[in-house]
Image (spheres, helix red, strand yellow):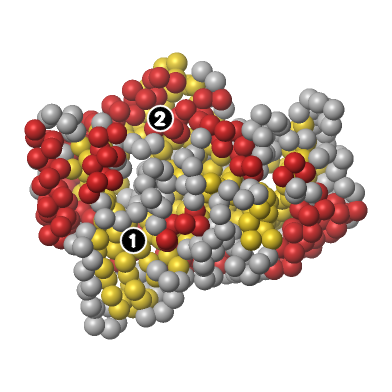
Amino acid sequence: MAAAARSIVGFPGPELVMKCCFSASPVSTPYSVPSPPHQRYHQSNNGCLLTMNGCEGDPRTPIGTIETRTFPAVPTPALAMDHLNSAISELKSDPSPSTSGIIRLQVPILQQFEAIGWLHEQHHLPRCYFSARCQSSNLDLLFDPTNGKFQSSEKKLVSVAGVGSAVYFRDLHPFSLDDWKCIKRFLSKGCPLIRAYGAIRFDAMANISHEWEGFGSFYFMIPQVEFDELEGSSILAATIAWDETLLWSWRKAVDLLQTTMCQVSSVVAKLQTEVPIASVLRNNHVPRKDSWDVTVNRALQMISRGGSGLTKVVLARSTRVVGNKDIDPLAWLACLQVEGQNAYQFCIQPPDAPAFIGNTPEQLFHRKYCSVCSEALAGTRARGASEALDLQIERDLLSSPKDHVEFIIVRESIRRKLEVICDRVLVEPKKAIRKFRRVQHLYAGLSGRLRSEDDEFDILSSLHPTPAVCGFPTEEARRFIAETEMFDRGMYAGPVGWFGGRETEFSVGIRSALVGKGIDALIYAGAGIVEGTISSLEWEELELKTSQFSKLIRCGVPLSTEVII
């Protein structure tokens, strides 16, 4: 087999000295009650040993080696699979001397294939999917098979799909600095495509309901097998991770990867994106409309009194959709891509858990080295049926006093939080309109420069939750939500995204749903309550925000509505 180009990052110590070298290369699954999130490695409901929980590692101890090996480009995913299988066999015969590490093997593919089409053909859990937005940065370190070297590139990483976990990170306690450090142990600037994908609960202090148990308080995974869709090309990759202090050896990691590879298909499907894919049997709102009105009025009374300090609170609704057949979360997600211009699409599905999917317009933050950006979104209107009507609606949103108050609360809160950890913060534009296929919002962009890349955890912990999904002041709004909402938000409205060595990006998990056998689909939406809010209009806004999901369902049978208070 042809030699691979290597990018190796080690940490000074007895096992490995930092180095970088290159060599020339010739040319839907049911779920059950999960295992405890804190155990060192996880077993699925069929008893199969999956991998180690990286949260059990020592956050102060770097792992021995972090390495990416890139092989010559091939024309098809099937040939990429053959190259990876050969490379894994060679790995097994040449064990690493390090007691811990992570190695990514990757094969470029000369054509662009859809990552979500590849993922749909896989039947292995856990799985993840994350797409970039129009504004996301280009991938600036790619392998050139013509000269065997890495070089800068203008190709954009369009989307990433992964199955299996080389290492996962999950626990019941709130996501902490030590948890972040445990994840960062396995990441490196020199290996930018080794990333941990996942999500964090909206409120880690709230009780976890049954449907969210598999996620814990947070869940992240570095995929075992990954398909990267780039503009004009693709990459198929396989990753192993091991740490003998967690009783997870090199041999176990390689054996498990070979087992996963035997279950991976090289087929890339073309998913339909425009047809209804389920008929509704029942449709249950929590809360129902009259309960919603009561809660909104209670919030307005607190806001008008002023004694509590509450100026905004975001109330949410959960809608359970029971269909006439099992709902395929990836088929839904493929349909959401049609809605998704300028938005993130995501899917996170731990073992023995339903899939959390979404099409969110909202960025929490993006960090590349020390540069960081975020954005404020607030105020919602439908798109107009004509260009003239759309412009009229835009002007109404820009001039609305109620929406202006809501927007300023969000923008200024994010600005103040960024100023604490950045040398300077730029707000541009200060107030504009961002349009999506069905809705339009008030928008502001914020950017700054971190004093240190290690401030990344501070960005995440300070920005979440933003007033756009919680309210202001944060603690007063969070307390009101905990006291009044009648369902568990889980990962809805929480951070969803990925950590990397040189950059990190998180969206806000809104416009989302939890899909799986036993629950069918739970669709989530929220609306901001400020002085001047009219309850019935906010209910209509909820309907507008969930319309991207409701278009996927046809009422082919009489619709029965079951109300849960």
Q: What residue type is labelled 2?
A: Ser
**Residue closer to the observer: 379 or 467:** 467
Q: Residue 370: percent from the left, percent from the top?
A: 53, 24
Residue 153 figure quarter: top right
Position of residue 519 in the picture relative to residue 526 (left or right) = right
Residue furthest out toward the bottom: 557
Q: Give residue 205's quadrant in the image.
A: top left
Residue in the foreground of this view, choosing between 125 and 393: 125
Answer with mark 2 or mark 1, whichever residue precedes in sequence. Answer: 2
- Picture coordinates of residue 331, whole percent (x, y): 46, 68
Residue 167 placement (x, y as % from top left): 66, 49
Q: Residue 38 carries which label?
A: none
Quarter of image, res 480: top left
Question: Which residue is located at x 55 percent, y 51 percent?
Answer: 37
Mark 1 residue crowding within 10 angstroms, few (<14) / some (14–19) / many (20+) = many
Residue 205 visible in the snapshot:
yes
Disc 2 secondary structure class: helix
Q: In this view, does 365 lie to the left or right of 104?
A: left
Mark 2 neighbour density, 10 Å: few (under 14) some (14–19) many (20 or more): some
Name which residue type carries label 1. Answer: Ile
Side of 300 where 337 appears, left or right = right
Quadrant for the N terminus, please: bottom right
Q: Measure the C-alpha gap from mark 2 to mark 1.
A: 27 Å
Q: Is residue 392 visible?
A: no
The residue under label 2 is 462
Helix, strand or loop at mark 1: strand
Q: Is 132 situated left or right of 66 in this image? A: left
- Labels 2 & 1 near each other (Cβ < 8 A): no
Rendered-image quadrant of the C terminus: bottom left
- Residue 372 position in % (x across, y down): 47, 28
Indicate whether 400 appears above or below 18: below
Residue that carries the numbered disc 1 in the rendered image: 523
